[in-house]
Amino acid sequence: MINTIDISKYLEIYPETSGLYPQKLEQIGEKYHQKGYLSKEELYQLAHLNSTRSSYHVKKNPAARVEKVTEVTYQLEDEFCQLALLVSLQGVGTPTASAILTSLDDATYAVVDTRVWATLYKLGYFDREKERFKPDDYLKMIELIRKIAKQEGFKVAEVGYALFAYDVIHREGTLH
């Protein structure tokens, strides 16, 4: 059986979690839209919002590569290809790639990570827990998140934030 959560309740709780700041993500997305690419520093800022532990790896990428990869990603329509291209950059895993896409369009994308998967697992959408994600995993999650967003009348990103907050509140034991 598939359960649901009170999206509004967990969106209210979200600012109290360690989750990224949606307004800062939106500001980076505005720069991305203006130029059609992210600079190395902008990508680092976004990666740092999403994962302070691994963001320093982004600095290992040549600046021109970051700009080219994010420019090509911006022009692509296929979500798998966007994700696959983004994760080719050092320091960018699927969760950070999801944040990059969400910075561009929070009505279509959501930031996902272990906590979001865990909530979807607890709600009965998946049959096993997972700690690492590939682009295909994101596509599975985003399909469900979009469905929930449509049913509940929220932006896709808002549902992602609520799922994150749900896990923060209900997790038993450590995250990893």
Image: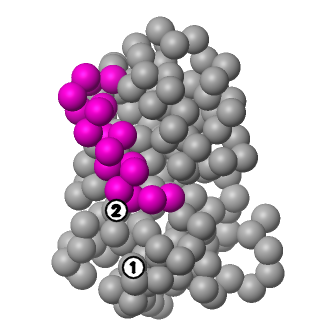
Magenta highlight: main SS: helix
Q: Does the magenta stretch include residue 98?
A: no
State the residue at coordinates (49%, 41%): 46
Kind of residue at disc 2: Ala
Mark closest to the chain's N terminus, 2 or 1: 1
Q: How crowded is mark 1: few (under 14 residues within 10 Å), some or many (20 or more)?
A: some
Q: Is residue 29 magenta?
A: yes
- Residue stretch rendered in magenta on the structure: 20-37
* Quarter location, residue 140: bottom left
Nearer the observer: mark 2 or 1; the answer is 1
Would residue 109 be visible to someone looking at this image? Answer: no
Kind of residue at disc 1: Leu
State the residue at coordinates (28%, 55%): 106
Q: What element carries label 1?
A: helix
Task: Locate residue 77, reporting x and y percent.
Answer: 25, 33
Residue carrying label 2: 157
Q: What label does residue 87 carry, if any? A: none
Task: Please tell me which residue lies in front, 140 or 15.
Answer: 15
Residue carrying label 1: 11
Task: Locate residue 72, reporting x and y percent.
Answer: 33, 19
Quarter of the rendering occupied by the C terminus = bottom right
